[in-house]
Image (cartoon, helix red, strand yellow):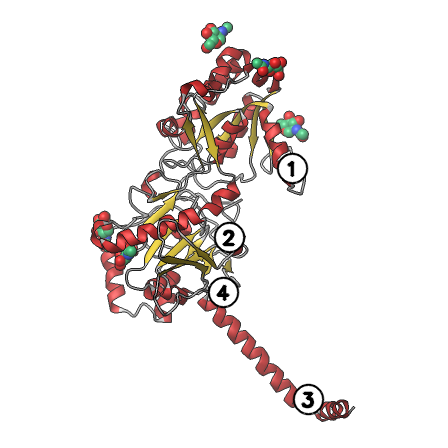
């Protein structure tokens, strides 16, 4: 009773002016803290333009950058703003919207008493829901090869938070890290800290992980990509020949032919790709022969509006009913062979590919399992060959001969993404760290601008008719998001 009376009394005494001032103060504090959080969090820049690799790496320009860097305090805010506006090889455009990468995950600390060795690994990148979707973080991992080491894995959203980590993973950055963030990350990098490039995307799509040209020899110690020469290799799939030739399961070729009721299928929802216009190629093929286009880029919907678990099984069934499936990669880069190839092969349909060059596919895919568009002089001769195979079962079934000598292993796309944060990969990274720490001069840095990354992307074909589908360097995209 007494307390109700007291509160009533207080209410009656409230001064509207005071109230207004107090409220303003609260709003001010909230705005201030939001601004603070925004400034400290990793900021992303979405670009609407084709992320070209046109890097003006003249000696003059590098000298110029070097002189700026030595004459100014790189952590001065005004300097950073000025620098960003200089458009120094990063952020080719600034017209994009900005989004924040934030997480609600708690950071982990190595215990102060170092009874056992403790390794802290922090992830940057993994925007929004991705941060916890792929693996629940933080996590403590025990590595079979590192018996007396505690391995902690967490996700950080503030540049400053990388200070305590032994290893920083730059993971799944599909858009742009800006110069400001690179400078800050460099500032907070602790001595000996190992930086790891992790991506399942090609250099063309992993543009956001590209460090400023100036830092290219000083950023990533190692890479974890699909590329066969990566320090830690995470392929989308691979061909595994049988060890014992006699254990071959017989392939029922009669059944294969019976299932094939349809001709060519293309399933795609990303219609505007960065390096080349695959949609146009499919439309050109459609002009001369029958191609059924499923997904957003066509007029046949696969699963309606909702993606259900049973849907992917249905899609597999649809694909299996086709003789050929267009497995067109979004980029033409060495070893960039995705589930588009592996899944088509494991379903039991012949993939028609564009991506890396023929020799590269021959190295990775089962022998005689695919048709590369670059084998043909024109879209008509491609069509003629496909129609010939359609009319000659013996010739068509030759594309299934490999099944007698091996098997295709593949990850689902989700598993492939999760793979970067899996125990196996984290432990492999931890082992590399100890190897490098014990002999630091023995290892080279991973240069994204060098032949081992940027240099792996090339033309989509040796034939001019295929190159004509490639976008010019100054190509402007219709869509803002790179995943259109
Ligand atoms: C990683 O690279 C940085 C910059 O070159 C270097 O200072 C550091 O010692 C390296 N760390 C390891 C573990 O190799
Ligand atoms: C970086 O490395 C490349 C090749 O290894 C070398 O040519 C270049 O001079 C280096 N640049 C800097 C800024 O150290
Ligand atoms: C192969 O498949 C066909 C059609 O499904 C079936 O009739 C036949 O019995 C199968 N042959 C073998 C050896 O399993
Ligand atoms: C899709 O488009 C193709 C070619 O324009 C046409 O032949 C076909 O009938 C269409 N299919 C559907 C389901 O609308
Ligand atoms: C069908 O393909 C087989 C195997 O490639 C070939 O030997 C045969 O001559 C072809 N038949 C016709 C009618 O083209």
Q: Nearer the viewer, residue 32 or 426?
A: 426
Q: Position of residue 26 (x, y in %)?
A: 58, 80
User: Circles 2 and 1: CB distance less than 8 Å?
Assistant: no
Looking at the image, is mark 2 or mark 4 earlier in the sequence? 4
Q: Residue at x 34, y 42 (%)?
A: 230
Q: Position of residue 90 (x, y in %)?
A: 37, 55
User: Circles 2 and 4: CB distance less than 8 Å?
Assistant: no
Compute the Cα span from label 4 to label 1.
Answer: 35 Å
Q: Residue at x 30, y 50 (%)?
A: 56
Task: Kindly identify which numbered label has been placed on residue 135.
Answer: 2
Looking at the image, is mark 3 or mark 2 earlier in the sequence? 3
Q: Quadrant of the N terminus?
A: bottom right
State the residue position of label 4: 106
Q: Residue at x 49, y 31 (%)?
A: 327
Compute the Cα span from label 3 to label 2.
Answer: 50 Å
Compute the Cα span from label 2 to label 1.
Answer: 24 Å
State the residue position of label 3: 16
Looking at the image, is mark 2 or mark 1 earlier in the sequence? 2
Q: Residue at x 76, y 90 (%)?
A: 8
Q: Nearer the viewer, residue 418 or 370?
A: 418
Q: Helix or strand or loop: what does disc 4 sit on?
A: loop
Q: Is residue 213 left or right of residue 1?
A: left
Compute the Cα span from label 2 to label 4.
Answer: 14 Å
Q: Nearer the viewer, residue 458 or 421?
A: 421
Q: Helix or strand or loop: what does disc 1 sit on?
A: helix
**In the image, the residue with mark 4 has its CB under 8 Å from the nearest atom of ligand 1:** no
Q: Helix or strand or loop: what does disc 3 sit on?
A: helix
């Amino acid at each position: 009773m007494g307390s109700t009376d007291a509160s009533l009394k207080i209410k009656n005494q409230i001064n509207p002016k005071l109230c207004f001032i107090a409220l303003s103060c609260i709003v001010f504090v909230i705005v201030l803290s939001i601004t603070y959080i925004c400034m400290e969090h990793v900021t992303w820049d979405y670009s609407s333009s084709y992320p070209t690799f046109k890097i003006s790496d003249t000696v003059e320009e590098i000298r110029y950058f070097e002189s700026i860097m030595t004459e100014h305090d790189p952590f001065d805010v005004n300097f950073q703003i000025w620098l960003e506006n200089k458009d120094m090889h990063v952020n080719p455009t600034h017209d994009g919207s900005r989004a924040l990468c934030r997480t609600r995950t708690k950071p982990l600390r190595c215990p102060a008493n170092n009874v056992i060795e403790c390794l802290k690994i922090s992830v940057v990148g993994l925007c929004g829901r991705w941060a916890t979707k792929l693996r629940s973080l933080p996590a403590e991992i025990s590595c079979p090869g590192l018996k007396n080491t505690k391995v902690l894995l967490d996700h950080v959203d503030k540049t400053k938070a990388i200070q305590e980590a032994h290893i920083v993973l730059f993971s799944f950055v599909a858009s742009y890290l800006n110069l400001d963030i690179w400078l800050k990350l460099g500032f907070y990098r602790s001595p000996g800290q190992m930086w790891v490039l992790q991506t399942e995307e090609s250099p063309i799509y992993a543009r956001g992980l590209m460090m400023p040209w100036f830092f290219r020899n000083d950023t990533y110690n190692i890479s974890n990509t699909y590329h066969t020469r990566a320090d830690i290799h995470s392929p989308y799939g691979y061909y595994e020949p049988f060890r014992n030739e006699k254990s071959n399961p017989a392939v029922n070729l009669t059944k294969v032919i019976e299932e094939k009721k349809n001709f060519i299928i293309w399933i795609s929802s990303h219609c505007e790709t960065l390096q080349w216009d695959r949609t146009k190629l499919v439309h050109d093929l459609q002009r001369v022969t029958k191609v059924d286009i499923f997904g957003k880029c066509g007029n046949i919907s696969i699963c309606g509006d909702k993606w259900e678990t049973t849907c992917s099984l249905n899609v597999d069934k649809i694909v299996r009913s086709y003789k050929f499936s267009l497995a067109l990669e979004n980029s033409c880069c060495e070893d960039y062979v995705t589930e588009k190839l592996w899944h088509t092969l494991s379903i039991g349909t012949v993939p028609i590919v564009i991506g890396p060059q023929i020799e590269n596919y021959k190295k990775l895919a089962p022998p005689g399992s695919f048709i590369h568009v670059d084998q043909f002089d024109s879209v008509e001769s491609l069509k003629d060959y496909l129609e010939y195979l359609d009319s000659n079962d013996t010739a068509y079934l030759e594309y299934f001969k490999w099944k007698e000598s091996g098997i295709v292993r593949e990850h689902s796309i989700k598993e492939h993404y999760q793979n970067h944060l899996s125990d196996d990969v984290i432990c492999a990274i931890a082992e590399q760290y100890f190897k490098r720490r014990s002999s630091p001069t023995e290892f080279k840095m991973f240069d994204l601008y060098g032949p081992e990354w940027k240099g792996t992307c090339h033309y989509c074909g040796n034939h001019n008719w295929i190159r004509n589908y490639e976008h010019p360097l100054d190509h402007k995209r219709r869509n803002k998001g790179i995943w259109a």
